Amino acid sequence: MDPKPTRRPGELAFTIFLAAASLGLLWSAYGIAGFEALSSPGAVPMATTAIMVVSALVVLFETLRRPAGRIQTLRRDILPPAVIVTIAMIALYALLLRPLGFIPTSLLFLTAMIWFLSRRGLLFCLGVAFGTVLLIWLIFRMVFSVLMPPGIVPEGRIVAFLMSLF
């Protein structure tokens, strides 16, 4: 017979988070129209989030019953430094996108991430990032006419210049 499955690092904290988030969503769904009738606007959201709460609590109690595992570690197996840096860089990208705009923010993000993940030279990383951002910008801005956050780069003038060439 197989030994009792062990709890992975971070699993308990994650299930507690799921239960708390489900309770918060249930409270939010209750705020839509209260518990007036089955046909009220909040009935379906409340039923859905109530199922989420029950499911999260069942998972939480099952997780609490399992012993903590000793083979894996949170730092090495679940959240290695590459994952943490990537999450931080994505958050920084989201924060800088509006003030700086798509082109400089994407160029900084891609250069830093390519350098961090590949450990290649800075000029190589900058070249790959520049080519990628240029290709994405040309396809989405020029071909599909998708508006991207302009920021500090005068994108309108660049587009007008490129259109005047054709």
Image (tube, grey):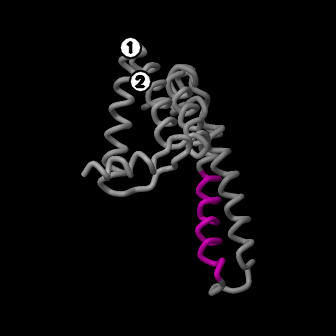
Which residue type does callout 1 highlight? Arg
67 to 164, vertically: above or below = above
The residue at 66%/84% (across/down) is 40
Q: Quadrant of the N terminus?
A: top left
Provide the secondary structure element on which disc 2 rests.
helix
Question: Magenta span has 42?
Answer: yes
139 to 131, vertically: above or below = below
Identify the image quadrant of residue 111. top left
Q: Report the side of 139 relative to 97 (left or right).
A: left
Label 2, label 1: how far apart the Cα atoms are = 8 Å
Q: Report the side of 85 relative to 114 (left or right).
A: right
Q: Which residues are magenta?
A: 41-58
- Density class for disc 1 (Cα within 10 Å; few <14, some 14-19, many ≥20) is few
The residue at 49%/44% (across/down) is 154
Identify the image quadrant of residue 26. bottom right
The residue at 39%/12% (across/down) is 121
In primary-sequence order, the first of circles 2 and 1 is 2
Kindly identify which residue carries mark 2. Answer: 114
Query: x, y (%) of residue 144?
Result: 32, 57
Kindly identify which residue carries mark 1. Answer: 120
Closer to the camera in the image, 156 or 108:
156
Q: Are marks 2 and 1 in contact (CB under 8 Å)?
A: yes
Which residue type does callout 2 highlight? Ile
Closer to the camera in the image, 126 or 30:
126
Query: x, y (%) of residue 125?
Result: 39, 21
Question: Magenta span has 21?
Answer: no
